[in-house]
Image (tube, grey):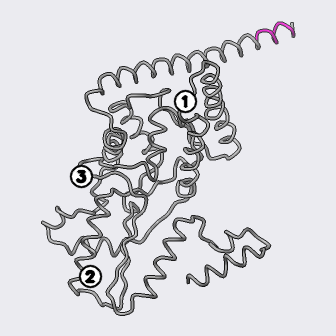
Amino acid sequence: MVLTAARYAAAALCGWSVHPEQQLTGEKKMHYAFTKHLAEILVQEARNDIPVCIVRPAVVTGAEQEPFPGWIDNFNGPGGLFIGMAKGIVRCSYTNEQGTLDVVPIDHVVNLTLAAGYRLGSGSDDKKDMKVYNCSSTENPLVQTKLCQAMMEAYGETPFNEIFWYPSIVFVRSRLVFKTLNFFLHYVPALSLDCLSWLIWMKPKVSWLRKYKKIREVAESLQFMQRTYFTFKTSNTVDLFKQLSKVDQEDFNFDIQRVSMRSYIKNCVYGYRHYACKEKDEDLPTARKNFIRYRRIYYCCLYSMVSGGVIFSILKLLLLMRRKK
């Protein structure tokens, strides 16, 4: 397989009629999933008589229970996007609001890996049969609208210390509309802040345009998953859990159907704040006051814009009526 990939790469250097990546990946639209697929093929070809099983997790996020609810120590996956939304930096998203995001708690992935390894080592399965355990939330899907509602509640309960605007997000299905909103809600404010920083001689460590570029890269990597509804077969995972004893089911829980996604997302937001961003709980009262202040400003601005639009429409209508008379 490695030699085949190398030949494809060499052919790409010589020239192809289509994009080299399309020739190499074929129908695989995600390079990350494609490399995982290559790794599984290599394992299957090289295992010989060695007993092997594969655990395939979906998008791994914060812990449900262990070591602490919401625990996470990195910004991988949707972490950067969630934090950007919490701080009021990310205002619109190119996705299907009725779509789902397949996320699984990190402790579920660990517990499933341990249980699968234990069963494999016990010799209960045929060594020639390489079982695959999909760790997915297909049985308990997280719809985008419910995800947004849970996050907005969490942002109010455990807001971040430093926010730049009241957290609000618009889900857009049209690429043209998204590009328009993305320009006015993201790049125009970022460019304005960078120019203002240069004018007052306070050059930031990282420019706002560069920050938005990184956030955009994370969002684009998730777009295909957000706009596509996936269903994964989890029969092996469900059967494995049922075969555990009651005690082991409690100690090594990976039953996604037991998870309250609303509570889980709230814990994840707290985890990104407390464990990943290292913000202290003692600062929460001040952060909540700051959040309420930004919310009042946001709704005042929104009310003013709507009122201004209504008044302008009424005046324009009266003017047209006067001209007809």
Pointer 3 local density, CA inside 10 Å: few below 14, some 14–19, many at least 20 = some
**x and y, in percent, of residue 278 in the image:** 33, 38
Q: Earlier in the sequence, mark 2 or mark 3?
A: 3
Q: Secondary structure at mark 1?
A: loop
Residue 256 percent across, percent down from the top left: 31, 60
Residue placed most toward the observer, 179 or 276: 276
Look at the magenta stretch and give its main secondary structure. helix
Q: Which mark is residue 204?
A: 1
**Between tags 3 and 1, which lies in front?**
1
Residue type, numbered disc 2: Leu
- Give the residue pinned by disc 3: 65
The residue pinned by badge 2 equals: 120
The answer to if 238 sits in the magenta stretch is no
- Circle 2: is it few (<14), some (14-19), or many (20+) Cα within 10 Å? some
Residues in magenta, as a range: 318-323
Q: x and y percent of residue 72 in the render?
A: 33, 49
Q: What residue is rendered at 32% in x and 21% in y?
A: 286
Q: Position of residue 100 (x, y in %)?
A: 48, 54
Identity, as a three-letter code, of the amino acid under mark 3: Gln
Residue at left 61%, top 34%?
Answer: 186
- Looking at the picture, which amino acid does disc 1 mark? Pro
User: Is 171 positioned to the left or the right of 161 in the image?
Assistant: right
Task: Give SS at disc 3.
Answer: loop
| Mark 2 and mark 3 residues within 8 Å of each other at the beta carbon | no
